[in-house]
Image: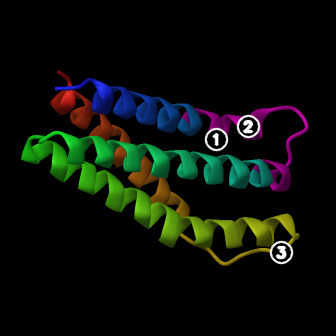
């Protein structure tokens, strides 16, 4: 088996972990206000999610070229569904909320951020298991 799916999974995992560490830390930097931090976060997560979509597609292509164990296919589908929920359902809500805060408004309470964080945690765990399964 080719090591490409393992490399893609490790890159994907590294990106998710790095941004997950960076996200709350930016608010502790001197001079960073909540609106400024949210503006940065919107850009960073848009870029992360775009890179994740490319990595998921590249991984799927490698799976189409060489037969893979069913368990790894199921995990890749779970990763794709998780990412789709984050990008299509949660991120638009979070971006709208961030835009309201940046504009000086007070948005209604929402649990979308907590759900996004939980999905990031689940994605990290699934990526680790996925990487172990596809390792040559």
User: Does residue 18 appear in this view?
Assistant: yes
**Residue 41 screen position, x and y as percent:** 70, 49
Circle 1 sits in a helix, a strand or a loop, which is it?
helix
Which residue was labeled with disc 3? Answer: 105
Task: Tell me if residue 121 can be seen.
Answer: no
Picture layout, residue 76 above or below residue 13? below
- Mark 3 or mark 1: whose residue is earlier in sequence: 1
Q: Is residue 26 above or below residue 77?
A: above
Q: Are marks 1 and 2 in contact (CB under 8 Å)?
A: yes
Label annotation for residue 96: none
Residue denoted by label 2? 26
Q: Nearer the viewer, residue 15 or 41?
A: 15
Marks 3 and 1 in Cβ contact (< 8 Å): no
Above or below 1: residue 100: below
Element class at badge 3: loop
Q: Callout 2: few (<14), some (14-19), or many (20+) C-alpha neighbours within 10 Å?
A: some
* Bounds of the magenta segment: 21-37
- In front here: 72 or 119? 72
Q: Which quarter of the figure has residue 35?
A: bottom right
Residue 83 in which image quadrant: bottom left
Residue beneath label 1, please?
Answer: 23
């Amino acid at each position: 088996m080719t090591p490409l799916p393992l490399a893609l999974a490790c890159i994907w995992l590294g990106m998710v972990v790095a941004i997950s560490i960076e996200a709350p830390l930016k608010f502790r930097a001197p001079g960073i206000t909540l609106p400024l931090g949210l503006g940065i976060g919107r850009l960073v997560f848009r870029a992360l999610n775009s890179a994740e979509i490319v990595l998921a597609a590249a991984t799927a292509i490698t799976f189409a070229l060489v037969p893979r164990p069913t368990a790894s296919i199921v995990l890749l589908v779970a990763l794709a569904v998780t990412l789709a929920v984050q990008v299509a359902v949660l991120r638009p809500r979070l971006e709208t909320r961030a835009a309201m805060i940046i504009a000086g408004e007070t948005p209604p309470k929402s649990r979308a951020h907590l759900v996004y964080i939980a999905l990031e945690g689940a994605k990290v765990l699934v990526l680790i298991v996925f990487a172990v399964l596809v390792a040559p």
